[in-house]
Image (spheres, grey):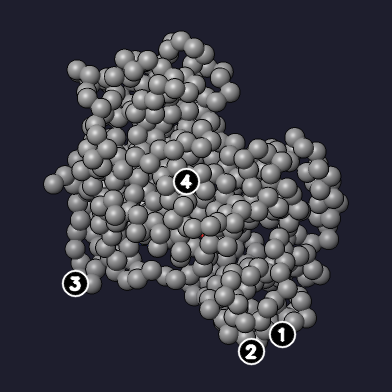
Amino acid sequence: MSRPVIVVGAGPVGLLLAGELRLGGADVLVLERAPRPSGESRGLGFTARAAEVFAQRGLLRRFGDVETSPQGHFGGIPMDYSVLEGSHFGVRGIPQDRTERLLERWAVELGARVLRGHEVVGLHQDADGVVAAVAGPDGRVEFEGSHLVAADGGRSTVRGLAGFDFPGTPASREMYLADVVGRGIKPRFIGERVPGGMVMSAPLGGGVDRIIVCERGTPHRERRTAPGWSEVADAWQRLTGESLHDAEVRWVSAFTDATRQVTEYRRGRVLIAGDAAHTHLPAGGQGLSLGVQDAANLGWKLAAVVRGWAPPDLLDTYHAERHPVGARVLRNTRAQGHLYLSGEEVEPLRSVVAELIEIPEVGRHLSGMVSGLDVRYDVGPGDHPLLGRRLPGADLPTARGLATGVPAGAVAGWADRVDHRPGGPPLLVRPDGYVAWAGDGAADGLDTALRRWFGAPAPTPAAAPTETERQPA
Ligand SMILES: Cc1cc2nc3c(=O)[nH]c(=O)nc-3n(C[C@H](O)[C@H](O)[C@H](O)COP(=O)(O)OP(=O)(O)OC[C@H]3O[C@@H](n4cnc5c(N)ncnc54)[C@H](O)[C@@H]3O)c2cc1C
């Protein structure tokens, strides 16, 4: 058996990545510190682009009926996200632990191994592979892998072990959150600016409400443990006048506006994804979704390297493509933080931004930015409007490339990596749903694009695999 790719962390990013790697035919071992799933509600949904990523792999329907809302906000200023075609303010009301359970089931169905109670405490890499030292239930053990991906969250241990730089701005504010049972708290879906700060509340179903409290002037502390409920209830009462002190609470936590990003997404055989690579204020619910898109971008490329067909620089395009996208999310969440959480002095700016948002082109721009739908990768020369953009409605359950509207012979050499559909516009779509080539009738440039993204053709045209053969080894 070949050495696996080691994924550290069974959060949403590590689990999606594990499934993506399996679809690409790589062996996968997920090492997770926690002995059992956390059960924490945390992120309550995902953005429009993350929903498309899940739909592409047939995962969205596993959530059942999902609710999307066109009405959202930018920095607490109401905004209609449907002003951009295909966009919305996200799939809402899905606690993160449900997303994680669903992704874990999928990854395991595809053949990923998930070891819980295994904390990565040491790491060594050389030209041949990686070794992860792990504190497990039976003491210290070592696991060898071909590569290792740090998906171990905002306080990533692997980030430090592998020597990634993580510059940025330190926390200036602390916010509390709690899931409160049976109090029917007045909904404030996009948050309400009140004298002294901001409060938010939203029903989670089953009589539980999520509250968030941001009180201005509260000194930020570097916490290792959650705040006590009385601390949160005190702040809520100071800002709303309402006492929740005697309420039952499911979960209490705190977060900050610390904003940081690693300077490189790859160091040799170690790669980094999700919150481990970038942390920011959870404004607009973008964190989980940003990481999900990291995983979708990285999975097929790393699997291609492991399977031996990757062109030489394919893995480097992970940093080239995802670092700027992450940096942009960091900028928009910092901007939203100012608009949302500053005091009276920000009111003139808020009123100007509110006017701007009413201009449809501005609304479309912000909607594309926060939803993730406007991502455009540099995939090569050409000015076709679809080039480098996601293909809406792409259905890619087996995570292979897809060529449409071109002669079968043009892609025959890549039949083991690229599916062919004779109909439709002339396009080459990558396994992550982004358009790598778009023709205007002829197949000019298709061969170059195939070699750039899918490597050299098979020496003799490979027979297209059957559905059964397409399942990862
Ligand atoms: C209040 C709040 C609200 C949010 N709302 C949203 C939202 O609405 N939408 C959204 O998209 N995002 C939201 N987010 C952000 C979202 O929760 C995170 O972005 C997301 O959890 C990141 O996923 P991840 O897999 O990168 O990391 P994590 O979910 O943090 O997972 C990392 C995993 O690695 C494990 N681990 C850590 N160290 C080790 C180690 N040394 N060895 C082995 N395992 C290890 C951890 O136990 C954990 O299971 C919110 C966050 C907060 C705090």
Q: Is 264 placed above or below 38 here?
A: above
Q: Position of residue 368 (x, y in %)?
A: 63, 40
Name the secondary structure under disc 2.
loop
Circle on res. 243: 1
Q: CA distance from mark 4 to mark 3?
A: 39 Å
Tell me which residue sits at (51%, 54%) in the image: 288
Q: CA distance from mark 2 to mark 3?
A: 42 Å
Q: Amino acid at mark 3?
A: Asp
Task: Rate crowding at label 1 as few (under 14), some (14 to 19) or many (20 or more) other CA atoms within 10 Å.
Answer: few
Residues 158 and 391: in front is 391
Q: Nearer the viewer, mark 2 or mark 3?
A: 2
Q: Amino acid at mark 1?
A: Ser
Q: Amino acid at mark 2?
A: Asp
Circle on res. 138: 3
Residue located beneath label 4 in the image: 55
Tell me which residue sits at (75%, 82%) in the image: 242
Name the secondary structure under disc 3.
loop
Residues 445 and 119: in front is 445
Q: Position of residue 236 (x, y in %)?
A: 70, 77
Q: Is 241 placed above or below 363 here?
A: below
The answer to whether any part of residue 313 appears in the image is no
